[in-house]
Amino acid sequence: MARSEPKSLESLLPRVLARLAGESGRGQALAPVWVAVVGPHLARHTSPHALHGTTLVVTVAGEEWARSLEAEAASLCEGLNARLGPGTVKTLTFRLERP
């Protein structure tokens, strides 16, 4: 049996986080991947809350952030799936942060 090349922790971690989030339903495990996809500025106003199947629920600081993310949802899903694995996140939904 041929052995495959060892993979770096950096390449494996996002998929492990996706599995944890999927099994627990808690999207907070995806925070490092979320920051990598959206960048630090947007991550200060948004965060992954829960992963329900292939739907990622994102907490946002206000309605304007939700509108902004809705406009970019397809590219955000693409960026997330590039790190987490194809089809991990098919849709994004948004909820307002509680004060």
Image (cartoon, rainbow, N blue to C red):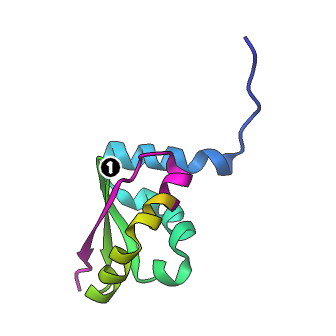
Q: How many marks?
A: 1
Which x, y percent locates residue 23? 34, 42
Residue at horizontal 33 percent and vertical 55 percent from the top: 26
- Nearer to us in this view, 2 or 74: 74
Task: Please state if 78 lies on the left or on the right of 24 as rendered.
Answer: right
Q: Over which residues does the magenta segment extend? A: 79-99
Task: Identify whether 99 is placed above or below 86.
Answer: below
Task: Identify whether 71 is placed above or below 5.
Answer: below
Which x, y percent locates residue 57? 29, 63
User: Residue 7 lies in magenta, yes or no?
Assistant: no
Residue at horizontal 32 percent and vertical 58 percent from the top: 91
Question: Which quadrant of the structure image shows residue 70?
Answer: bottom left
**Amino acid under label 1?**
Thr
Which x, y percent locates residue 68? 37, 82
Q: Which residue is mark 1?
A: 54
Residue at horizontal 67 percent and vertical 46 percent from the top: 9
Q: Secondary structure at mark 1?
A: loop
The C terminus lies in which quarter of the figure?
A: bottom left
Task: Please state if 23 lies on the left or on the right of 43 as rendered.
Answer: left
Which x, y percent locates residue 74? 41, 64
Residue positioned most to the top: 1
User: Residue 96 lies in magenta, yes or no?
Assistant: yes
Residue at horizontal 35 percent and vertical 53 percent from the top: 90
The N terminus lies in which quarter of the figure?
A: top right
